[in-house]
Image (cartoon, rainbow, N blue to C red):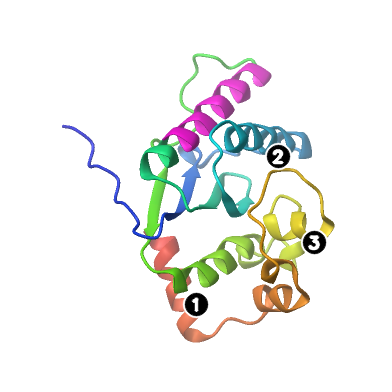
Amino acid sequence: MPRRPRASAFTGYYHVINRSARKATLFETPHDYIAFLAVLKQGLEKYEAPLVSYCVLSNHWHLLLGPIEKGELSRVVKWVTATHAMRWHRNRGTNGTGPVYQGRFRSTPIHDLESIIPLTRYVERNARSAGLVARAEDWRCCSLAQRLKQTRSVPLSQSRLLSTPLWVDYVNAVMTARERARETRKTER
């Protein structure tokens, strides 16, 4: 049975998630995170894909890409996923032992521009929501930390708003009941 085609976003923005197979840990050491970010950087530069925000956790990652054509989205994320999986196996000496990722990446089109701000917040506060850090900017493999420390792990779309103390406070602020409900729906998909 053929795969269902990916939905397109009128805005050209997409929230992308990929998870490890069997909920296995993908990133155990700081070097593992750095290696993934190097692959991500290569893919973004190779396909000239604009990245708004990202967060890499131990067994999955989130990207907010755009504006980008649906075909380009698939090319860049497929390249990043496949390249990371090959290098992951090679570094562990586990070639031929099965998949690294649970399957095809999941992408959700962003249909209206007003959803980009809350979605960027969702991505950047992911480690905080998981209880891994007290403040979102303390998670080193996140676009918020990268922007604040002005490191260049991966190329990010420029936005003055996302580099302000106001944004940092918004990302870390207690979520309203409505925001929590929206976040719960996203994680249950």
- Count of numbered circles on the image: 3
Amino acid at dot 3 = Leu
* Near-viewer residue (149 or 66): 66
For this view, does 67 lie left or right of residue 5?
Answer: right
Residue 134 located left or right of residue 86: right
Look at the magenta stretch and give its main secondary structure: helix
In whole angstroms, how far apart are the C-alphas of marks 1 and 2? 28 Å
Residue 62 located left or right of residue 4? right
| Label 1 SS | helix
> Which residue carries the number 3 mark?
148
SS type, badge 3? helix
Amino acid at the residue labelled 1: Arg
Q: Are marks 2 and 3 in contact (CB under 8 Å)?
A: no
* Residue range (magenta): 75-92
- Residue 64, horizontal then vertical, whole percent: 53, 54
**For residue 47, above or below residue 68:** above
Between 109 and 72, the residue placed more toward the observer is 72
- The structure residue drawn at horizontal position 64% and vertical position 31%, both measured from the top left corner, is 42
| Residue 95 on image: x %, y % | 55, 14
Label 1 sits on residue: 180
Alpha carbons under labels 2 and 3: distance apart: 18 Å
- Left or right? Give the position of 178 relative to 33: left
Question: Quadrant of residue 168 in the image?
Answer: bottom right
Q: Nearer the viewer, mark 3 or mark 1?
A: 3
Q: Quadrant of the C terminus?
A: bottom left
